[in-house]
Image (cartoon, rainbow, N blue to C red):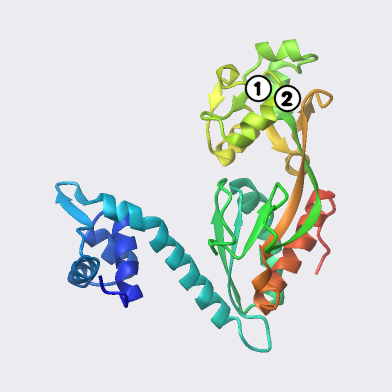
Amino acid sequence: MDTTIDWQLYRSFLAVLREGSLSAAARALGQAQPTLGRHIDALEAALGVPLFTRSQGGLLPTDAARALRPHAEAMASHAAALERMASSQGDAPRGVVRITSSEVVGVEVLPPMLAELRRRHPAITIELALSNRTQDLLQREADIAVRMLAPRQAQLIARPVGVIEIGLFAAPAYLAEHGEPASEEDLNKHSLIGFDQPSAFQREAAKRMPGMAREGFALRSDSDLAQLALLRAGTGLGFCQLPLARRDGLRRILPEHYALRLDTWITMHEDLRHNRACKAVFDALVEGMQRYASHRPPDRP
């Protein structure tokens, strides 16, 4: 096997894996389809194993391709981190910083903070990776993370920014039509909004708030944003972060029974502590999330 394989071949390989065809991968990378075809042929020759089989639906990865995928993705993450580090050099903070957070935090909480950050540091480019999956900072899937759990890895810098409470809420229009439950038993008469397929977090939350099982939800979605939209629209009772609920004028239901307090952290890899762009973003998120967790409005410019 050739031990000096060009990274570009792995990049093309990963694009074909993700997109499922040469044509789609070519569009994603902005390259010509024949070029990607040659890259795949060259990589297969260098490795000495077939990576794809052709089918009517596109290119199907072989067992060898599936085994290589996590390593190729790690290479891509490190290459992107290298590019971000190189672009951040200079006097003023500049370069690309990749932030990961949950969907709700990324859509509902971070945008005003990022707007202020861009006013202060217009040379910083932000990549926002929204996922309820915890992305790996050690593998450089992202530079900075907003997390609702304390990081365990010693190589990460972590700052606690406060406690965000989650409770059960309803829109005033829903309560005006259906009444407000006075006890846990009354919830059986109401439409509950919740998850479809439980995650590890939801299973742990259910231990602290019994009775919140999938079968009891009249409206189910694994998208936190969809659940929030349903709650705002007055379709039922649902869970929401307290600062968001207050902002939207939602009314809390049975707070003595339904309360989940989440420690919130801003984290990044310790290798980025001297990266000016990452430090500027890290500090801005710490300040912004501390205000959010304490329900304080941002300072006026």
Q: Position of residue 149 (x, y in %)?
A: 71, 47
Residue of label 1: 212
Nearest the viewer among 190 and 127 is: 127
Task: Name the residue located 62 percent from the left edge and 19 percent from the top edge.
Answer: 191
Q: Is residue 172 above or below residue 17?
A: above
Q: Amino acid at mark 2?
A: Met
Nearest the viewer among 133 and 188 is: 133
- The quadrant of the image that shows the N terminus is bottom left
Indicate left or right for 46 with 129 as reference.
Answer: left
Q: Position of residue 91 (x, y in %)?
A: 68, 89
Q: Residues within 10 Å of mark 2 (few under 14, many from 20)?
A: some
Mark 2, secondary structure of its residue:
loop
Indicate left or right for 212 with 249 as reference.
Answer: left
Task: Check whether the beta carbons of the residues at disc 1 and disc 2 lie within 8 A of each other.
Answer: yes
Residue 167 falls in which quadrant of the image? top right
The label on residue 104 is: none
Task: Name the residue located 73 percent from the left edge and 62 percent from the top edge.
Answer: 285
The label on residue 209 is: 2
Q: Amino acid at mark 1?
A: Met
Q: Is residue 38 above or below residue 69?
A: below
Task: Name the residue located 85 percent from the left edge and 53 percent from the top edge.
Answer: 296
Residue 89 falls in which quadrant of the image? bottom right
* Residue 233 visible here: no
Q: Position of residue 75 (x, y in %)?
A: 43, 67
Nearest the viewer among 35 and 46 is: 46
Q: Among all residues in the image, which is located at the extreme bottom? A: 91
Q: Position of residue 208 (x, y in %)?
A: 74, 27
Q: Is residue 253 above or below residue 79?
A: above
Q: CA distance from mark 1 to mark 2?
A: 7 Å
